[in-house]
Image (tube, rainbow, N blue to C red):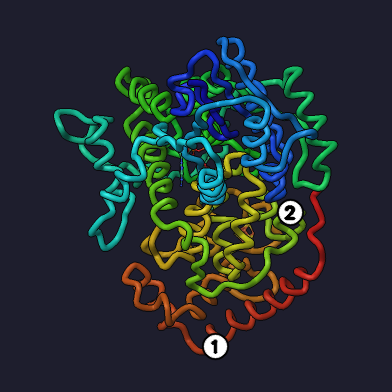
Amino acid sequence: MSSLRLVMGDQLSESVSSLRDYQPGDTVLICELWQETTYVRHHKKKLVFMLSAMRHFSQELKQHGMKVKYFTLPDALTCFSEAIRTVLSDASYQKVIVTHPGEWRVLQELLDLKNQLNIPLEIRKDDRFLCSRKEFVHWAEGRKQLRMEHFYREMRKRFNILMEDGKPAGGQWNFDKDNRKHLPDDLIPPLPERFEPDKTTRQVIDTVNQLFPEHFGDTDNFCYAVNHKDALRALDDFINNRLRLFGDYQDAMRQGSPWLFHSIISLYLNIGLLTPMQVIPRVEKAFNEFRIPINAAEGFIRQVLGWREFVHGIYWLHMPDYPKWNTLHSRRPVPGFYWSADTKMNCIAESVRNTHDNAYAHHIQRLMVLGNFALLAGLAPDKVNQWYMEVYADAIEWVELPNVHGMALFADNGIFASKPYAAGGSYINRMSDYCRHCYFNVRLKSGMQACPFNYLYWDFLDRNKTYLGNNPRLALPYKNLARMSDRQKELFREDARVFFRSLDKEQYSQPALID
Ligand code: FAD
Ligand code: SF4
């Protein structure tokens, strides 16, 4: 009984469930599709990364003796259903096997196809995640609020990670308080290892430049790993050279330093070049061998075992309604400078430039600069989500949506976070050197030269008072707002009005691409 086994672009792991019981006579189907490459205008480096990784994966499967049917752009087909039907019309199979997709949209497509095919289509669990969708539903049942910290502690216990005699290693579950240090000027983070494009990647670069010239970003200096072996090397490079200080400077930002002490492995994890269980034990081992301190080990493992799995659970628990919420009724379009970097706000310009150059920005740039501005300025969640999906190489909907819609924009009614991640300029100034290079003055609260984050922060709290005013975690800022004189309030409201007037004018122009 031969099977057709579909492997999607984010399922490039040899251990993926759809390949598990491969038999001679089966065919593996991998396809570059117009729908998947264009449903948002993905950054050119994101396309190069994914398409090159797919081609390399297909070559590896063939080397292992598997039969692979591979559709290549530009001759490729539109969507998964069309690709499956095309292969089924040429040869006979008894069954189609696929691993559960990472996006609701694709799941619907597969379910529709399943109803139409006259052979079975089996959708298998994606067990590269450590907490299945079912287990997450079970964990969430009966809880008033879903908090990552509770989930994370259970995952630590369940998988016995960083545990000593049933207790958390180092005597506490969470070392976040130790992980907010300002990066000293004389500390230079080691650069991540680069992977020069081979022949396959160079061919993909040509294809992407020909077919998607209008997409954001460029393909210059492409340096990401595109196969499992190199992704493991990138992980080891991080563990050996940057992980030791990952915890300390996890929230830091610096002009001209896009990578800092981050791992840059989300893109590999999200398409299957690495799995969580190839990452977590290596980090734990480095801790057990006294190569890294507990705040680094715990801080990092919390991201992968905690946040990543939690976000995955939240997405599937709340789809398809999740993106429909717009709790704060935010409506403003995304300004052109999210593409062009043409703004006097240096923190934003720098984060957009990094995003443009690398299809990457680290967490604090995404959350506390670009996300924070989008929140304070009331940018429309659907448009902001689309922007994040386009520009980051690691953006797959299951992870992008809860992070943007829930964590950054607080658009989900507080499902994800207990309070909005809103902050004025002083937070950005504390965690970076951006303000030193900025036209605006971070210490000024009002006036032409004042940092826009300062007055936008108070204006945000003021205009959302009805909804946020009773949030116990915002009690202090609301108390400070109440203490302000009428004159102070009038000043920040007026500054915000002027700022929004100029921002709204900008919306009418087509976003000019940075290049
Ligand atoms: P590190 O800082 O080295 O962290 C290690 C790993 O932990 C990451 O590789 C990632 O796998 C995991 N991780 C850390 N935080 C999160 C999180 N909040 N959610 C899920 N996994 C996490 N991550 C994506 O993978 N894809 C996205 O599209 C994405 N969009 C984001 C949008 C916003 C607004 C925010 C605030 C966060 C977003 N994140 C996203 C989470 C996080 O910012 C990235 O995973 C991280 O910056 C990737 O860089 P890194 O590999 O160097 O991570
Ligand atoms: Fe950003 Fe304000 Fe600092 Fe300028 S002064 S970099 S706008 S926080």
Q: Position of residue 229 (x, y in %)?
A: 55, 17
Q: Nearer the viewer, residue 396 or 181?
A: 396
Residue type at mark 2 is: Trp
For marks 2 and 1 on the same chain, the one whose residue lies earlier in the sequence: 2
Q: Is residue 319 left or right of residue 374?
A: left
Specify the quadrant of the image occupied by residue 295.
top left
Which residue matches tag 2? 339
Q: Nearer the viewer, residue 380 or 377?
A: 380
Q: Residue at x 61, y 14 (%)?
A: 62
Residue type at mark 1 is: Arg
Q: Position of residue 348 (x, y in %)?
A: 65, 55
Q: Is residue 393 left or right of residue 131?
A: right
Q: Is residue 301 left or right of residue 259?
A: left
Q: Residue at x 51, y 21 (%)?
A: 2
Q: Residues within 10 Å of mark 1 (few under 14, many from 20)?
A: few
Specify the quadrant of the image occupied by residue 167.
top left
Q: Position of residue 310 (x, y in %)?
A: 38, 46
Residue 363 visible in image:
no
Q: Residues within 10 Å of mark 2 (few under 14, many from 20)?
A: many
Q: Nearer the viewer, residue 505 or 112?
A: 112
Q: Residue at x 45, y 56 (%)?
A: 319
Q: Residue at x 31, y 56 (%)?
A: 146
Which residue matches tag 1? 487
- Residue found at the far bottom of this picture: 486
